[in-house]
Amino acid sequence: MTERKPRFIQNHILKGTISLDSASFLYRDGEADPLFCIADRYSNFVKGEDPKVRLSLIKEGPRDFQLRIAVLDGHDRRPGYHTERPRYYSIDPNNWLEWGWIIFPKSSFKELLEFLFRCIEMITIEEK
């Protein structure tokens, strides 16, 4: 049996992992109540979450280079996130324009910039 892999797995030219303060996504499905999926280093509800992102510079066929940001589980047990029902907002979450948030702490800014500079260098080399 062939192992199934994400389509871009062989096209990762450069990878890096960076710690986050939090990552959260709002799941909305028609008539059902919205649901937050949250990984939060400073959660008041769940201790031990360690959210991270994996950054990848990818090149898929004739397309230009792309930056891929994947939220990692970030926990020693699965899942490394928790769910909450939005309940303390003045605007109905079904009407929000935003549905995902990735919060980088100041301590990760330098690491993020260094990764982006490496991407620029790699792209410059590839385009010569």
Image (cartoon, rainbow, N blue to C red):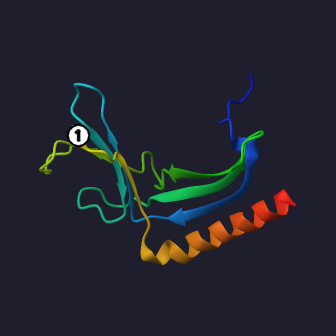
Residue that protrudes farthest toward the right in the picture? 128
Relative to 20, does residue 54 appear above or below in the rendering?
above
Name the one closer to the observer, 109 or 77.
109
Give the image location of residue 13, x and y in percent. Answer: 75, 54
Name the one closer to the observer, 13 or 41.
13
Relative to residue 30, is residue 80 drawn left or right? right
User: Three-letter amino acid code at disc 1?
Assistant: Asn
Relative to 88, does residue 40 appear above or below in the rendering?
below
Q: Which residue occupies 45% across, 50% down?
A: 77
Element type at marker 1? helix
Quarter of image, res 85? top left
Give the image location of residue 64, x and y in percent. Answer: 71, 48
Give the image location of residue 2, x and y in percent. Answer: 74, 25
Q: Which residue occupies 71% across, 66% down?
A: 120
Quarter of image, res 84? top left
Relative to residue 122, is residue 57 drawn left or right? left
Quarter of image, res 95? top left
Q: Quadrant of the N terminus?
A: top right
Q: Which residue occupies 24% across, 56% down?
A: 45
Q: Estimate how packed mark 1 is, as few (under 14), some (14 to 19) or many (20 or more) residues with alpha carbons within 10 Å.
A: few
Relative to 114, does residue 127 appear above or below in the rendering?
above
Q: How many marks?
A: 1
Q: In which quarter of the image is the C terminus?
A: bottom right
Q: Which residue occupies 70% across, 63% down?
A: 119
Relative to residue 90, is residue 14 drawn left or right? right
Name the one closer to the observer, 1 or 32.
32
Give the image location of residue 101, x and y in percent. Answer: 38, 54
Question: For mark 1, what is the residue?
Answer: 95
Relative to 22, does residue 68 appear above or below in the rendering?
above
